[in-house]
Image (cartoon, rainbow, N blue to C red):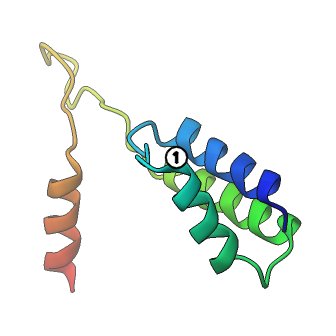
Amino acid sequence: MTREQVQELLATIQVAFPNFNPKDKKATTNLWLMMLSDYTYEQVSSSLKEYIQAIYNNIKLPTRKTSKSAGYDFLFLWMQFFVQKEKW
């Protein structure tokens, strides 16, 4: 994998996850290049696409619980975590 391909992957991550904003982009690129050197760009790109799709497909949109609800009932990730944890 080339440096330009790693930079393209990092740009994709930054678009999908706006809070991902590494302070030192050169160091981040170097680290990812080292860590992903055993993989092809196609492998990493495909895996990243699947990962992003899995996250976005699991987002639960707010819904109205009853027809007389004044607003939408929002779900919070921490609530989902505790509900899922209780099932264990």
Q: How many numbered marks, from 0 up?
A: 1
Q: Measured from the top left, where is residue 38 in percent x and y? A: 78, 85
Relative horizontal placement of residue 86, taking residue 9 as reference (left or right): left
Residue 15's quadrant in the figure?
Answer: top right
Q: Nearer the viewer, residue 71 or 8?
A: 8
Residue 83's quadrant in the figure?
Answer: bottom left
- Above or below: residue 16 compared with residue 39: above
- Above or below: residue 74 compared with residue 77: above
Q: Give the amino acid type for the residue marked by disc 1 in the picture.
A: Tyr
Residue at 13% over, 77% down:
86
Residue at 15% over, 15% down:
68
Q: Measured from the top left, where is residue 30 in percent x and y? A: 62, 65
The quadrant the C terminus occupies is bottom left
Residue marked by disc 1: 56
Residue at 71% over, 67% down:
47
Relative horizontal placement of residue 25, taking residue 32 as reference (left or right): left
Q: Residues within 10 Å of mark 1 (few under 14, many from 20)?
A: few
Q: Nearer the viewer, residue 47 or 20?
A: 20
Q: Measured from the top left, where is residue 9 in percent x and y? A: 70, 52
Secondary structure beneath dot 1 equals: helix
Q: Nearer the viewer, residue 36 or 13?
A: 36
Residue at 21% over, 32% down:
65
Q: Nearer the viewer, residue 49 or 9?
A: 9
Relative horizontal placement of residue 40, taking residue 37 as reference (left or right): right
The quadrant the N terminus occupies is bottom right
Q: Measured from the top left, where is residue 28 in percent x and y? A: 53, 59
- Above or below: residue 78 compared with residue 64: below
- Above or below: residue 66 compared with residue 33: above
